[in-house]
Image (cartoon, rainbow, N blue to C red):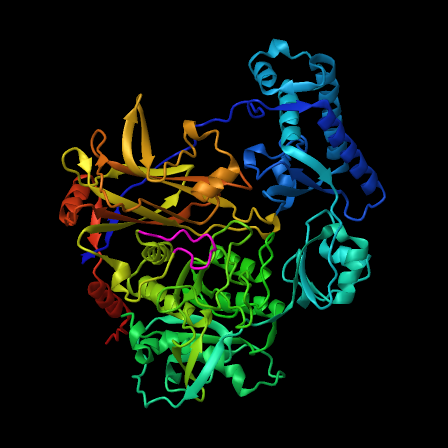
Amino acid sequence: MNPTLQLKGKFEHKPNPNKPGARNIPKGRKVDSKHLSELIEQLKAIAAYWQKDRTIGGILLSVYYIDVIAKSNRINSLFKKGKISSNDTIRGSRFEGTPQKHVFIHFISEEILYEAIRKLSICNSYINNKYNGCITHDIIDTINNNEKVYECEDIKRSVFVNTLVDAYYVSKFAVDTEVDDAEEAVIISLYKTNISTRDLLDKIGIDMAETKMIDDQTLRVSPEDFAKLKMNVPYLISMKVVDMREIAKEDILGYDDFEPLSIPDPSNEPFVGVIDTLFDDSVYFGKWVTYKRMISDDIEVDSIDYEHGTAVSSIIVDGPSFNKNLDDGCGRFRVKHFGVATHGRFSSFTIMRSIREIVKANPDIKVWNLSLGSALEINPNYMSPEAAILDELQSLYDIVFVVAGTNKGSRTKETMKIGAPADSLNSLVVNAVDFKNNPASYHRVGPVLSFFNKPDVSYYGGDKGEYITVCLPNGEGKKIGTSFAAPWIARKLAFLIYKMGFSREIAKALIVDSAAGWNRRDDTTHSIGFGVVPVRIEDIVNTPDDEIRFIMTGLTESYETYTYRLPVPYENDAHPYYARATLCYYPTCSRNQGVDYTDTEMDIHFGRIHLSKGKVSIKSLNNNTQGDSSGAGLYEGVARTLYRKWDNIKHISDQIKSRAIPKKKYEAGMWGLSIKTKERLKSKHDTPMPFGVVVTLKEMHGKNRINDFIQMCQLNGWLVNRIDIDNRIDIYNVAEEDVEFD
């Protein structure tokens, strides 16, 4: 086995060299007077609607687009005023129709609305008078390049062009007021407008105590209060989920007395956080668990309320002792266990507040396991509030949540979407497989927000006839479920972060990369994610003798973060290697943006360096041309499908084929890595964002060239560390020893 290598060196940074040119509609397309007239009438109707309703101090409207729309093709001119850009007025988004099309919700002033009507009216009159009611791509191109052609004095040339391009991509404008009823307490989010939530509630007669609000726009309301909101301000309700959730059940397949087990007292083992049902500290490993009950003492509990949480913590502490076939080599871990729910229904509102409080109070815990999940399916158009809390915490703190992928009942035959909080984007979401690596009979599926890949990976959670052994308060238990797959991955992440000293970005990337392997199955049903994670930790950290794996970390300090100094071995002017790369990062997310949930995009380019016409380019493994001059024509939907644009995990890989054809060596034989960063809500990010990349090279003819690679890296200025598991554990143990001073 070859060890994983850690490459340390300097990344270069540079701003985006591609300056946006004048806008235009696609070639062969047109904007006609009929469409402009329809948009004008729709905006006039919206103005009339809001003249009768002054509740929110402005105009809330929906913009329906003709496709999945790129940021550059969103409304640019119509809602722009001074320093206020159209992008600043966005309050949410969703997908509608088949094929999917974007709908954006904007909040604008009455002045901006009337100015939009004026712009469209001037454009409409001008193209009617000069171009017979129809303007094409070629005409707009002529106007962009020859100012003498443009003769309209009522509106600037750039505003004229931008208004027409805006109009081309917009299908219609509307005010959306359709909202389903609520028969029980719900958690809702309201669009942000010029009226505060408290003032709004007072105005329509809702008495809202502070404890019922999660944040300024998200709150818990009774069915009666929801009915008042629906009657008075239906257009403000952006998202709605039931508060009282039923936990997705796992099957308990019997109890046995444990054979007498012994466990030494804990010493310096790292802590994993567990947020679950209650814990019974009378079990044999009780000293390894620090337990805090978070539910009210007024709530009556039964013995069954201790089973799920105790079982989950038993795997994290000592799972391999009673699951010999799953001995991962990670050792034992201590647990800080927080009991936030009973076995039945629970309040999402209460648990969300508890999770935020727990994480803030325990900054030393880097890895958290959350095996609670809703029996209800996620909504395709917005992130669950539970998942949004996890994503927010992971963007604020250096932590990672491992979340169970939730289960469907044994009587449910049809495909079922995963339940909250398994839609959390930053979390590592784990589904279950049987011991033949097939999706478990109870598994549920992604994607999230109709696009993001979930689950991330899968692991063994048992199935009919093959179970996971756990420790329950009354003895040994045989169980199946994603709840008992997730803790095994939490163990591996804890090992990689605490004992190996990896960043969370690298630890997550190693887990994903090990699951994907070389022959990743095209998981069109989103049931197993990138694949099944290997059992042994050595198979995640080490590689076969014919492979070279190296890891790199960096910070995105500009548009592009890159290096052109990766010396992949070659012979006979060719690189005899298959290659793959996995990128992970933890973006800030905005739930109020709906389906456009992630604020930051990191786009990975990895491959051979090629000089052409005096310019350096990377011939990326997946032929990625985003950001290149040749990639300017990529449609947003294509970029999302082919290159996972806006997803926070990127995995690109060669396919291993029966006939191996080495890659042609260009010039000096160097390879390059480039991370290009884009922001949705602002022109640039305020602080550098960490990323982790795992690269694996497989020699096509089975040769071990790792020493050649190390030597070449050192000659090119890289500091190369061989990652040795035993050595890293020794370092961890020494670092954790208590030192007594005389």
Task: Residue 592 in the image: state x and y as whole percent.
Answer: 61, 50
Left or right: 323 with respect to 184? left
Q: Position of residue 373 (x, y in %)?
A: 53, 68
Give the dominant element type of the magenta stretch: helix, strand or loop. Answer: loop
Part of the protein shown in magenta: 519-530
Q: Quadrant of the N terminus?
A: bottom left
Residue 368 within the magenta-colored segment of the rendering: no
Of the 4 image quadrants, the one containing the C terminus is: bottom left
- Please tell me which residue lies in front, 291 or 256: 256
- The location of residue 466, given as percent across then percent down, is 38, 76
Question: Is 520 in the magenta?
Answer: yes
Q: What residue occupies the far top of the structure in this picture?
A: 148
Which quarter of the picture shows residue 486? bottom left
Q: Is residue 218 above or below residue 135?
A: below
* Residue 118 seen in the current view: yes
Q: Name the residue located 60 percent from the left edge and 35 percent from the top edge.
A: 74
- Number of dots carrying numbers: 0
Q: Report whether 302 appears left or right of 482.
A: right
Find the residue positioned furthest to the right. 52
Vertical position of residue 619 compared to residue 378: above or below: above
